[in-house]
C-alpha cells in the first residue's frame, strides 16, 4: 500500500512538473505549477523537499532584493518581464496561428 501511494504521488507530481515546465515560457501559472508539483513530490521524496527549500530560499532573496531597489529599477524589471511575455505570445501565435475566437479587430496577423 505504501509503495502504491508513493508511486501515485510520484506520477501526479511528475505530471504536474511536466505541465509546469512546458508552461513556464507561456503566460499563466507555469512557475506556480512547478512549485505546486514540488510540494506534492516533497511529501514523499527527500530530493524534492531539498529542491523546494532551495527554491523558497532564492525566491525570498530575489523578492527581498527587488524590495530594496528604487521604483525605477522595479518598473524597468516589470517592463522587461512584460516585453518578454509579449514576445512569447507573439511567437506562439505566429507558430500556432491566431485562434478563430479572437475578434477580428485585435491587431494580430491571420
Image (cartoon, grey):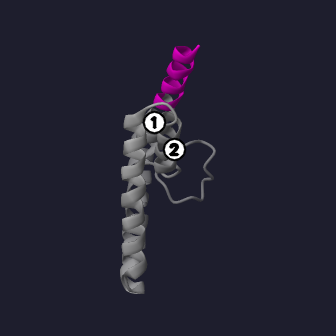
Q: Which mark is residue 37?
A: none
Secondary-structure class at tag 1: helix
Mark with earlier residue (1, 2): 1
Instruction: Look at the picture and state if 52 lies above or below 108.
Output: above
Residue 110 can be seen, yes or no = no
Which residue is tagged 2? Answer: 33
Label 1 with label 2: CB-CB less than 8 Å: yes
Question: x, y (%) of residue 84?
Answer: 37, 60
Residue 39 can be seen, yes or no = yes
Residue 47 quadrant: top left
Disc 1 versus disc 2: distance between alpha carbons?
7 Å
Tally of numbered discs: 2
Question: x, y (%) of residue 1?
Answer: 59, 13
Question: x, y (%) of residue 110?
Answer: 48, 47
Q: Is residue 36 left or right of residue 96?
A: right
Q: Is 13 one of the magenta-colored residues? A: yes
Instruction: Look at the picture and state if 4 lies above or below 21.
Output: above
Q: Is 19 one of the magenta-colored residues? A: no
- Residue at 60% x, 53% y: name it: 104
Q: Is residue 34 left or right of residue 76?
A: right
Please name whichever residue, 34 or 108, is drawn nearer the observer in this view of the structure: 34
- Residue at 36% x, 59% y: name it: 58
- Callout 1 crowding tier (Cα within 10 Å): few <14, some 14–19, many ≥20: many
What is the span of residues highlighted in magenta in the rendered image? 1-14
- Callout 2 crowding tier (Cα within 10 Å): few <14, some 14–19, many ≥20: many
Please name whichever residue, 78 or 14, is drawn nearer the observer in this view of the structure: 14
Secondary-structure class at tag 2: helix
Assign the magenta stretch its main secondary structure.
Answer: helix
- Residue at 45% x, 48% y: name it: 26
Q: Which mark is residue 17?
A: 1
Amino acid at each position: 500500500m505504501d509503495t502504491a501511494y508513493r508511486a501515485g504521488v510520484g506520477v501526479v507530481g511528475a505530471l504536474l512538473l511536466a505541465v509546469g515546465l512546458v508552461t513556464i515560457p507561456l503566460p499563466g501559472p507555469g512557475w506556480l505549477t512547478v512549485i505546486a508539483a514540488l510540494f506534492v513530490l516533497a511529501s514523499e521524496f527527500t530530493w524534492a523537499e531539498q529542491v523546494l527549500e532551495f527554491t523558497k530560499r532564492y525566491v525570498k532573496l530575489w523578492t527581498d532584493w527587488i524590495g530594496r531597489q528604487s521604483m525605477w529599477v522595479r518598473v524597468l524589471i516589470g517592463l522587461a518581464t512584460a516585453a518578454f511575455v509579449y514576445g512569447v505570445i507573439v511567437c506562439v501565435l505566429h507558430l500556432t496561428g491566431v485562434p478563430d475566437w479572437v475578434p477580428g479587430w485585435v491587431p494580430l496577423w491571420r
